[in-house]
Amino acid sequence: MVIDLTPTRNNTGPARLLDMIEGRSKQVFKTWLANRPEAWRDKVDVVAMDGFTGFKTATVEELPDAVTVMDPFHVVRLAGDALDRCRRRIQQTLHGHRGRATDPLYRARRMLHTGDGLLTDKQRTRLEALFAEEDHLEVEVTWGAYQQMITAYREPDPALGRELMRRLIASLSSGIPAALIELRTLGRTLKTRAVDVLAYFDRPGTSNGPTEAICECCSGWSGTGWSRWFRSCCSAVTLEAIGPFPGALPLNCPGEQRGRHRPAHFGDLIRRLSDPTSDSGS
């Protein structure tokens, strides 16, 4: 699914559906781009995408002057998935079974994904009790990285947000204890795609959200498996600044920060994990 985000960036209208392409591969997207007129391709300024490397390489080969941006939604989802995998691993290690309704880690699964500034007082109390258990330290460390990523994207100043994200990527790229399997994997991925992740802050608002939206807002698709089929079988990217495109369709989909609880500094959590006798952080 190829979307033009130019109208939304220029405040001239909704995003436009340009085409729906069967298949999700580098070659599918590369062929589609190659079949566009050269004058049209030269006007493409930005390409927003998920973490699939095939879209990245196809864009570089066919649109060498375009800026590639890894969509914030998918970047945060990488961190969220790492948090979930860590929670499940610790759950299994401690209790020998999958999460149950009475297990603290399982009960906190949704709360762990809530932005720090949106936590209620009751949720903060529950979170503090959860992290008071030393056995949950690895979950706390991974949660800390997840929260730092959200903080970077929510920062109103793009330059500061970019610096926060750069520091996070650097901190996850080296010095992570071997026990933090999920964070080490996340760090490698972010390091590989750092240029695309950081490019977002140079062009705030760039997103392939309209692609996700059309999969969810169309009647009868969401919740039936169709939206997942679309994401797995169709190319899904967003283009900007491309100008007129014959047959393009407009996408008209329907669609007080609380006091902040400061999590322990990420570096302190890493040191605690590396040195169990350390008293720093909590």
Image: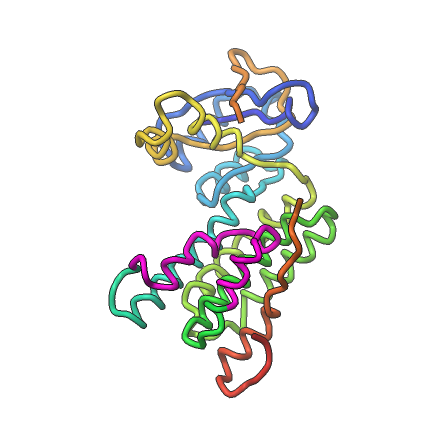
Q: Does the magenta stretch include residue 102?
A: yes
Please tell me which residue lies in front, 268 or 229. Answer: 268
Labels in figure, total: 0
Where residue 11 sits, quadrant-wise, is: top right
Residue 229 pos. (x, y %): 33, 32
> Predominant secondary structure in magenta?
helix
Q: Which residue is drawn at 45% across and 32% down?
A: 236
Q: Which of 118 and 163 is in front in this view?
A: 118
Residue beneath the point at 53% across and 79% down: 272
Above or below, 266 relative to 14 = below
Is 40 in front, or is 5?
5
Q: Nearer the viewer, residue 77 or 40?
A: 77
Residue 177 coordinates in the image, percent (x, y):
47, 75
In the picture as drawn, the residue positioned furthest to the front comes out as 122
Residue 229 placement, left or right of 120: left
**Viewed as shown, does residue 37 lie left or right of 182?**
right
The stretch of residues the image draws in magenta is 100-128
What percent of the width, then of the height, locates residue 103? 33, 63
Percent position (x, y) of residue 222?
37, 29
Residue at figure coordinates x 57%, y 23% from the top left: 15
